[in-house]
Image: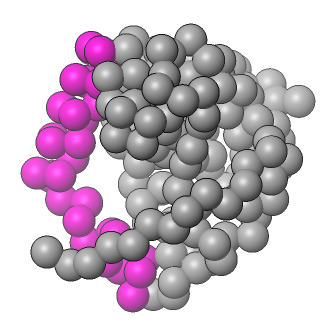
Amino acid sequence: MTDATIRPYDPTADRDRRALWDLKRGFETGIGEATGGEDKSSRYESKLTERYRRRWLAWVERCIDDEPRCLSLAETDCGHAVGYVFLLPERLSFVWDAAVVNELYVVPEERSEGVADALFERAIDVAEGQALPLKRLLLDVDRDNERARRFYDRYGFKPWGDIVAREL
């Protein structure tokens, strides 16, 4: 199991805000690493402007105001943030009639060390405390991301519908 500590994100702490943004950048730029190729990676990376950062962190803060435990950080003994899990607040559960893991990310050098498991178990704990329309936890995972799919398979996730999208 991991030596990382899982703790709530503090939106008032500059250190947490900087760490979360660094992790978010890793999440977004890593989206196309194993799936989708360079086009997907560059598309996600191109949105990471200063304006996007400010808007995203403000949205995170509103989510934390709704549900203080919805975002957790994993950090090493020396205080270095190595991952996060972001569960949408209960207020948004009617979008999918379920709890939703919005994002789970662990830096590459800490993968296979139990950090993702510890973060995910925290998300499950928070989700179990939500008053949900249906007792269900869902998330979006790229069907070509074999590593992530194996991780979620261990937790009993099964395919449920398909999301379709179009450009606006």
Between 76 and 32, which is closer to the camera in this rendering?
Answer: 32
Residue lying at 51% horizontally and 84% vertically, measured from the top left: 36
Q: Quadrant of the N terminus?
A: top right
Vertical placement of 132 versus 150: above or below?
Answer: above
Which span of residues is magenta-colored?
39-66
Using residue 25 as the reference point, say whether residue 99 is left or right of it: right
Residue drawn 38% across and 24% down?
A: 89
Q: Residue at x 18, y 59 (%)?
A: 49
> On screen, 85 above or below 162?
above
Q: Quadrant of residue 121 in the image?
A: top right
Q: Position of residue 31 (x, y in %)?
A: 50, 67
Q: Position of residue 152 (x, y in %)?
A: 74, 50
Please state the horizontal and vertical placement of residue 132, each as a whole percent of the image: 48, 22
Q: Is residue 119 visible?
A: no
* 16 in the magenta segment: no
Q: Is residue 23 visible?
A: yes
Q: Is the residue 48 above or below the residue 73 in the image?
A: below
Task: Let me know if residue 41 is in the magenta part.
Answer: yes
Horizontal relation, residue 31 to residue 17: left or right: right
Rendered image quadrant of residue 95: top left
**What is the magenta segment's predominant secondary structure?**
helix
In terms of depth relative to the viewer, which is nearer, 37 or 22? 37
- Here the colouring is one colour
Give the quarter of the image for residue 4. top right
Q: Foreground: 141 or 24?
A: 141
| Front in this rendered view, residue 112 or 77 | 112
Q: Where does the image place residue 58, in percent across and percent down from the top left?
A: 18, 32
Most distant residue in the right direction = 1
* 35 on left or right of 23: right
